[in-house]
Amino acid sequence: MTVLDLLTEPLQYDFMLRALGAASIAAVVCALLSCWLVLIGWSLMGDAVSHAVLPGVVLSYALGLPFALGALVFGLLAVVPIGAVRESRRVAEDAAIGIVFTTLFALGLVLVSITPSHTDLSHILFGSILGVSRADLLQIALLAALALALLLLRRRDLTLFAFDPTHARAIGLSPRRLGALLLMLLALTAVVTLQVVGVILVVAMLIVPGATARLLTDRFSRMLLIPPTLSVSAAVLGILASYWLDASSGGLIVLVQAGFFTLAHVFAPRHGLIARHRGRRGSGTAQSAEGRADAQIASVAERPSGTGSGEPFTDTSSASENSGPSRISSSAPTTMS
């Protein structure tokens, strides 16, 4: 079997085409949003919102409502208790996020265990990308289009909020509103990605692409292009690999993304391990060369004023020490004319 057969055989099935479409759409949205999450330092917030949507999904399923509605509501509601706990000033922000998202995730697990269902709700936790229907694909596309539109329309404001919230406030922008907008987009993206990799692995698709691009470039304009490319490539490779290996599609997608991050961490041209090692060696060589130059300058400075740089300096005291009766004691003071 040729490489072309390995790539084209899975494309003969409709469920594989729908899986590739849903995974690619979710990958683009997650990758773009991850750029701002990595810059602001909201990695744990992404983990919190992605886990907090679980109770909403289960309740929507039990009530016969679209699961996206419940997931979006609970994703937005998760921000309120986080802010309430954080305002106490006795609990740090990361601790508040950890308390809230673990509590809501535990509530979701309890609801999964007690909700009567003829289907296995574990696909909410681990994803079911190969089971995406046409209706699910349409829902994913609509939510992704909404999230992308908001990101692109407010990208300048969000970028300023990520780099300098004080300056954003000074020019009339509200950092609190921009933060709320970013959290809403985070909840939307978590809903989009839910069926692709599940609740547990959503945070990987929200963080790994942006972290990889952060190693590869220092310009934010390029950073917005690298993560979608890598994320879509990982989604396609992961799904094709899951077809041939008969393994979890969501898990393989995340593993491919982790592989891209590992390669960038080692081989990045400026921030990779190899580049940093070469930089340390170069700086060490430069420091040693500078030290030798300083030593040469110091030796020249210590020579008498009448001695040229090319002439060897002869110590007359050593000659006088061998002059027999006129030998000068080393402890006696000497004078120079």
Image (cartoon, grey):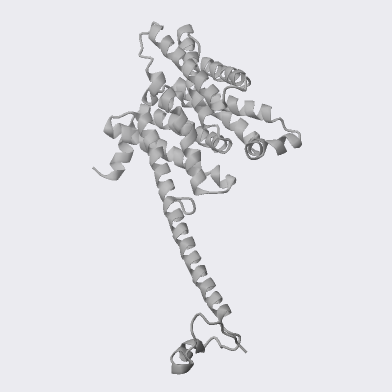
The residue drawn where x is 42% and y is 40% is 233
The residue drawn where x is 41% and y is 35% is 235
- Give the image location of residue 104, x and y in percent: 49, 16
Quick check: can you spot residue 228?
A: no
Vertical comparison of 270 with 166: above or below: below
- Give the image location of residue 143, x and y in percent: 54, 25
- The outermost residue toward the left is 1
Vertical comparison of 198 with 310: above or below: above
The residue drawn where x is 45% and y is 24% is 194
The quadrant of the picture occupied by the C terminus is: bottom right
- The outermost residue toward the front is 325
Quick check: can you spot residue 55?
A: yes
322 or 211, which lies in front? 322
159 or 30, which lies in front? 159
Q: Quadrant of residue 73?
A: top right
- Give the image location of residue 68, x and y in percent: 51, 18
The quadrant of the picture occupied by the N terminus is: top left
Count of labels shown? 0
126 or 4, which lies in front? 126
79 or 94, which lies in front? 94
Left or right: where 212 falls relative to 130: right
Left or right: where 263 falls relative to 84: left
Vertical comparison of 245 with 262: above or below: above
